[in-house]
Image (cartoon, rainbow, N blue to C red):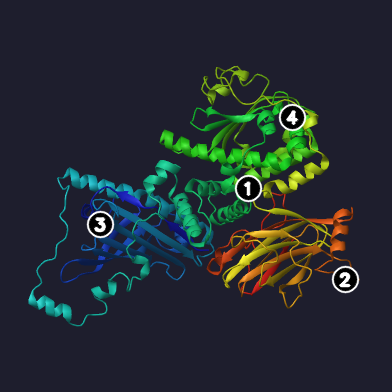
């Protein structure tokens, strides 16, 4: 496997010419880097005007490896060839290095660049990238890989210190300014030589973009690059390899992700959750981004308004900061009637509220970072369990809690900095036994549990909260405005039908429409298309019964009344007098959709006009389905208590050029209209004229 390294942008607040003078002092030896044994110049050339200076060096590095490995390899040092292209006119230094020792077994490539800062011409930027490919090494490939990357990152860390050391040395010796390069007068003889033929091995072969390839083209700083000082200031101290993982994952998202790019601190949380294993973090982050897109989580803080009942009986809220500056959230779980809340508002509402707390926690961390001038990436939770009893172990409630833990663990990793559990009663070990297997080991290490009054005094809350922040109900000085909870009156409970309806439809109420399909009374939606080349996409879930879905095209609006293009009319729209093939035509083959299925599809329109999405009840074998029922059939269906189908549907009209970058209806996910925690799997439309997809 090829190991890669990418540095952030380092900024030296010195002019390019002075940094180059400091860089040259690193050669031929560099005492500050002990493994660098020395170097010699193999070839050197200059352009006639002196603007471009090319130096090729052979560098010797001591092998910092166990004695057994050095003995097997038979070497005490390795040789690298380094080619520097210094362009005084453009003020760039481009460096390429590769190994000569064991080149048939190990391939090491490094690219570095010194360039002028794009916003301040008196500052200098530095970047580097490297790759290590160990093809074979006497059976010690894994050991060599670890040793090589450890040694490389150690040298990377010293690199900036070395340049700064020589910069300080130059300044202390009285050299604080070096004039910029200016072209020297070109003699007539030099001009003739410049116009004449060149040796292929001369300077021309070393110009950027030729022999050294595009990897050495000058790199300019822009908004897509991370500055090392910014990382230290806003994200915290990272090792060189951790910085590299962050930059590589961010760059990969910028190249491949079609939606909103997460913030750097958000990406970093997923890397930490997977111990900076790049592939694992990428997979976890992609699944979370798909989940956020499917459930419109980015809009949650703007759209979510908890019900009044939840605001009254949910015993949780934000309360100042802990001693380290983390936002503090207090949850009085023991005082909260979880069973009553479940029966009064439903599981989906509670989950939405928990997600809004997690979103608010991230927002508050960003605010604390700006306020304190140092990275705050997680928040603290104070969990008061006084009053916890067997009522809290109600199995549906525990099941809902486990689901919420799963969602938060998967999508908000490393957001909890510390969990302080106080006044844990005797029943707590039972609850802990149920939930602890579902909590990540890294998260469990952040739990501090106090039983009885052990939270008071040294070693208790005072070690983590200032005394003036400890809430009054725990003996502190701060008046806490977190609701006290209490029992939810049974009169506020939902009926079983309301409970089912709330859990299934709540999260879709903002985007999806619900419809009932009766026998003989199909549900139809009309979409007016003004341009021939457009794309209609649909996404619907069958909640009850089996239906047949079809798509029709008509040249005129089924019912009178002007509407804006793209708006919908729904109900039963096709007139009884219309004739299929004359007044309207079928453009999508009928699709039988079973109860519980989720259907996604799209249709590229060929003609302007009105397109009709139709759902009708699926007739059992032997009966004849009629898309145009008579008036008597419809009236009978509406007034009879017979079976009916229920569905949730969503559609979107896209311009043809936007088809590949569509929203959830084109990259829809697994069915589960009440399952925020459901696993997701993307689907694509392909290149066909139209398509439909069933997700089970």
Alpha carbon distance from label 2 to label 4: 53 Å
- Whether the residues at callouts 3 and 4 have beta carbons within 8 Å, the answer is no
Alpha carbon distance from label 2 to label 1: 48 Å
Query: Disc 2 vs disc 1: which is toward the camera?
Result: 2
The residue that label 1 is drawn on is 410
The residue that label 3 is drawn on is 27
Alpha carbon distance from label 3 to label 1: 50 Å
Q: Is residue 110 left or right of residue 363?
A: left
Alpha carbon distance from label 2 to label 3: 89 Å
Q: Position of residue 584 (x, y in %)?
A: 71, 73
Q: Position of residue 515 (x, y in %)?
A: 75, 55
Image quadrant assignment for residue 444: top right
The residue that label 4 is drawn on is 337
Q: Secondary structure at mark 1?
A: helix
Residue 307 in sight: yes
Q: Earlier in the sequence, mark 2 or mark 3?
A: 3
Please identify the quadrant where the C terminus is shown: bottom right
Q: Secondary structure at mark 4?
A: loop
Q: Secondary structure at mark 3?
A: loop
- Whether the residues at callouts 2 and 1 have beta carbons within 8 Å, the answer is no
Query: Disc 4 vs disc 1: which is toward the camera?
Result: 4
Residue for point 38% across, 52% down:
156
Q: Secondary structure at mark 2?
A: loop
């Amino acid at each position: 496997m090829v190991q890669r390294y990418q540095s952030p942008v380092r900024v030296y607040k010195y002019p390019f010419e002075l940094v180059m003078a400091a860089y040259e002092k690193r050669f031929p030896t560099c005492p500050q880097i002990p493994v660098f044994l020395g170097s010699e110049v193999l070839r050197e050339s200059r352009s006639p005007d002196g603007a471009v200076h090319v130096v090729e060096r052979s560098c010797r590095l001591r092998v910092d490896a166990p004695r057994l490995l050095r003995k097997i390899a038979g070497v005490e040092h390795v040789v690298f060839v380094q080619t520097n292209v210094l362009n005084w006119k453009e003020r760039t230094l481009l460096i390429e290095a590769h190994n000569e020792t064991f080149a048939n077994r190990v391939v090491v490539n490094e690219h570095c660049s010194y360039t002028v800062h794009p916003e301040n011409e008196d500052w200098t930027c530095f970047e580097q990238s490297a790759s290590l490919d160990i093809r074979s090494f006497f059976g010690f490939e894994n050991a060599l890989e670890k040793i090589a990357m450890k040694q490389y990152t150690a040298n990377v860390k010293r690199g900036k210190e070395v340049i700064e050391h020589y910069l300080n040395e130059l300044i202390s010796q009285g050299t604080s300014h070096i004039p910029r390069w200016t072209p020297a007068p070109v003699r007539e003889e030099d001009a003739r030589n410049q116009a004449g033929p060149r040796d292929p091995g001369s300077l021309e072969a070393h110009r950027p973009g030729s022999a050294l390839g595009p990897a050495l083209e000058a790199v300019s700083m822009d908004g897509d690059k991370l500055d090392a000082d910014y990382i230290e200031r806003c994200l915290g101290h990272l090792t060189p390899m951790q910085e590299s993982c962050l930059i590589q994952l961010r760059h990969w998202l910028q190249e491949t992700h079609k939606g909103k790019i997460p913030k750097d601190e958000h990406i970093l949380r997923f890397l930490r959750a997977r111990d900076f294993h790049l592939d694992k973090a990428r997979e976890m982050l992609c699944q979370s981004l798909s989940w956020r897109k499917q459930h419109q989580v980015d809009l949650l803080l703007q759209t979510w308004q908890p019900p009044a009942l939840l605001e009254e009986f949910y015993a949780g809220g934000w309360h100042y900061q802990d001693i380290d500056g983390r936002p503090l959230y207090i949850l009085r779980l023991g005082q909260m009637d979880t069973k009553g809340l479940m029966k009064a508002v439903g599981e989906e509402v509670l989950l939405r509220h928990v997600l809004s707390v997690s979103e608010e926690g991230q927002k508050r961390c960003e605010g604390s970072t700006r306020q304190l001038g140092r990275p705050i990436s997680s928040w603290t939770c104070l969990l008061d369990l006084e009053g916890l009893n067997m009522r809290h172990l109600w199995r549906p409630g525990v099941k809902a809690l486990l689901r919420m833990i799963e969602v938060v663990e998967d999508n908000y990793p490393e957001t909890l900095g510390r969990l302080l559990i106080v006044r844990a009663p005797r029943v707590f070990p039972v609850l802990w036994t149920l939930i602890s297997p579902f909590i990540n080991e890294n998260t469990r290490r952040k739990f501090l549990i106090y039983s009885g009054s052990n939270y008071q005094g040294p070693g208790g809350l005072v070690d983590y909260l200032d005394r003036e922040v400890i809430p009054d109900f725990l003996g502190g000085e701060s008046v806490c405005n977190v609701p006290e909870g209490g029992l939810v009156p049974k009169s506020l409970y939902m009926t079983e039908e309301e409970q089912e309806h709330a859990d299934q439809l709540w999260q879709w109420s903002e985007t999806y429409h619900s419809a009932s399909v009766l026998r003989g009374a199909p549900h139809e939606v009309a979409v007016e298309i003004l341009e021939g080349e457009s794309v209609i996409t649909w996404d619907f879930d069958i909640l009850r019964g089996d239906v047949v879905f079809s798509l029709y095209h008509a040249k005129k609006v089924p019912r009178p009344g002007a509407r804006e293009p793209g708006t919908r009319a729904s109900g039963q729209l096709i007139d009884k007098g219309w004739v299929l093939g004359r007044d309207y035509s079928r453009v999508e083959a009928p699709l039988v959709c079973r109860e519980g299925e989720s259907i996604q599809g799209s249709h590229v329109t060929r003609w302007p006009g009105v397109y009709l999405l139709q759902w009708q009840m699926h007739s059992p074998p032997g009966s004849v389905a009629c898309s145009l029922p008579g008036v008597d059939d419809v009236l009978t269906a509406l007034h009879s208590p017979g079976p009916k189908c229920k569905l949730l549907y969503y559609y979107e009209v896209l311009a043809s050029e936007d088809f590949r970058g569509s929203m959830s209806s084109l990259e829809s996910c697994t069915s589960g209209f009440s399952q925020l925690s459901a696993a997701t799997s993307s689907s694509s439309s392909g290149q066909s004229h139209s398509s439909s997809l069933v997700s089970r």
